Amino acid sequence: MFLLRVAVLLTLLERGHAFRAPAPLSTTTRPTRLSATGDRWYEGRDVKYPRGAANMPTGPPPETGGYGHEPELFAFWKSIASQPDVYEVKVGRPLGIVFEEIGTAARPQGVKVIEVQAGSNAAAVGGISVGDVLVGVSAVRYIGGEYLGKARPERDIFPADKMDFDTVVGAISSNEEPECDGVVLRLRKA
């Protein structure tokens, strides 16, 4: 029953009908210049900080304008450099990956790859194998509001080792075009 749920959810996700994130902003409203540390838009390990994990400072920059880089997320971004068994890929949607939840409903421990569909975006990227464990996933969140001003999008890479299946699918779904040209997946080789 669980594998049927996985297949149905991924099929719906590929068709764009499951776990829809808020309507994407037009490209003219996306921040074009980094005016505060809250304007992060994670693009991958080889992109210079604050748009990626390359050339990161020793600690998170000071908070500016009501936004900062949470120390836990900053450490997670930076950890890619010290983990030789972990790699990152950017995959367009639909991914073409079938995930299976690890752990229990009471203690989720992320998801692992149980299939890479032939001819899919994931297969075209290459390197993703059955058994690889998702340890991080990019997701778009909206920060701000009445107190801090107009909510604006921010894309971070979040640790996935404590996420349940639905949370992983929601994170993947939040990476919508035109702002996002793919989903950044951080995986540990099986």
Image (cartoon, rainbow, N blue to C red):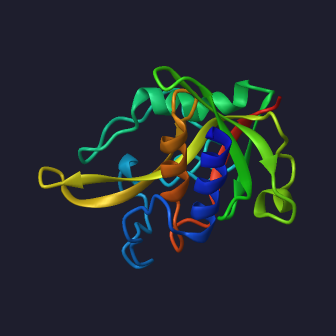
| Residue 28 placement (x, y as % from top left) | 40, 79
Q: Position of residue 105 (x, y in %)?
A: 49, 26
Tally of numbered discs: 0
Residue at 40% over, 66% down: 31
Q: Is residue 44 above or below residue 24?
A: above
Does any portion of residue 168 appear in the rendered image? yes
Determine the residue positioned at 38% across, 71% down: 23
- Looking at this view, is 117 or 42 the one in front? 117
User: Would you say residue 55 is visible in this rendering?
Assistant: no
- Is 67 situated left or right of 91 in this image? left
Residue at 40% across, 37% down: 69
- For residue 61, which quarter of the picture? top left
Most extreme residue toward the top, as rendered? 107
Toward the front, the furthest residue is: 1
Left or right: where 149 falls relative to 42: left
* Picture quarter with the N terminus: top right
Percent x, y for residue 36? Answer: 35, 51
**Dividing the picture into quarters, in which one does residue 133 lie?**
top right
Name the quarter where the C terminus is drawn. top right
Furthest residue in direction left, as rendered: 147
- Residue sitting at 87 percent across and 60 percent down? 118
Direction from residue 121 to residue 37 in the image, left or right: left
Q: Position of residue 176 (x, y in %)?
A: 51, 66
